[in-house]
Image (cartoon, rainbow, N blue to C red):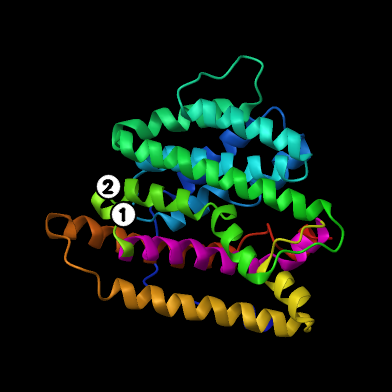
Amino acid sequence: MKSQIFSLEYPFELKLNPFEDSSEQFARRLIDEYSCLPDDVKSKYKKFSFGRVTASVFPNANFEKLIPLIRWMVFGFCFDDFYGSKPLAEIIEASKKAINILNGELPDFNDLEFYNQLSIAKAEFLPSVTPYWLTRFTEHHQDWFGAMYLETKYNCKQNSYPSIEDYMVIRENLIGGKLMCDQLEVVSDFIMPEEVIKDTQIQRFRQLFSRIIAWYNDVFSVDWEVQRGEKMNLVLIIENEKGCTRDEAYAEAINIHNKELAEFIKISDALSDFGEYNEGIRRYVENTKLFFKGQEIWYKGTERYSPKEVQ
């Protein structure tokens, strides 16, 4: 079945960002600033190419726009890995601190580096966004953290899995797709006003984006998550609920991914008329497709989910 994983390809343009090298150098410098991480973890993270993946999924972003995107990407990966195995009470406390930072609180001198980097990223985003965007961005962090709470509860209970249906709802938030949708607005120079965001077609488009990147990640990360003792993975959930083989679960997860990708393409090809916002939405749709293709290339090249990283 592993060979089928590499049949997961997107029928979209591959566009290279000319700032990939400088993005990777910047990401490596950011990783060094996380004094709370052991040196061996920093070395490992530097092999995962967080700067390159950011440039790859946002190929239309110039380096100025990439700076907060890279800063947040490093923060997101590091925060999730660092707190993913912590007790629930510690995760809740950390997430409350992060929300306070997004709401305007300044980090304390003795705080872990996560909060300083999040505060800087927020300040770097501010010139490009609106107060409404920042409110949404903060709410979407709350959704992300809430999904982490649920993930921790399931991981702490032996042989406890959510249903496939419940998992899909949790996973939309756990992957951080809503936060990526917000950042795609910045890259597209189109901060969506309330009337656009609340449109049912746009909401479904953004939901499908989040789900598709989640299923893609799940297909690639099964061995990595099994090694970490984690259960929140579509392949593992299907295997548990249906009592099928791992290969059969892979096949069903890939089928779910492909069906939702087909719906995503159908919506993107037949969007409603949004009048003065049509051009901004066109750019946004283009950048979501470029994101998928950039993600595909990164997953197939990164060491994060490679066999030697899950041993």
Q: Residue 218: within the magenta?
A: yes
Residue at the disc numbered 1: 198
Q: Position of residue 305 (x, y in %)?
A: 70, 61
Q: Is residue 132 visible?
A: yes
Residue at the disc numbered 2: 194
Q: Quadrant of residue 89?
A: top right
For label 1, the crowd category at 10 Å Cα-Cα, with few meaning under 14, some 14 to 19 and many 20 or more, is: few
Residues in magenta, as a range: 201-228
Mark 2 falls on what kind of element? helix
| Residue type beneath disc 2 | Glu
Q: Residue at x 57, y 55 (%)?
A: 175
| Residue type beneath disc 1 | Lys
Q: Residue 280 versus residue 202: which sits nearer the camera?
A: 202
Using the image, determine if residue 236 lies above or below residue 187.
below
Q: Residue 239 versus residue 4: which sits nearer the camera?
A: 239
Q: Position of residue 132 (x, y in %)?
A: 32, 38
Using the image, determine if residue 73 lies above or below residue 29.
below
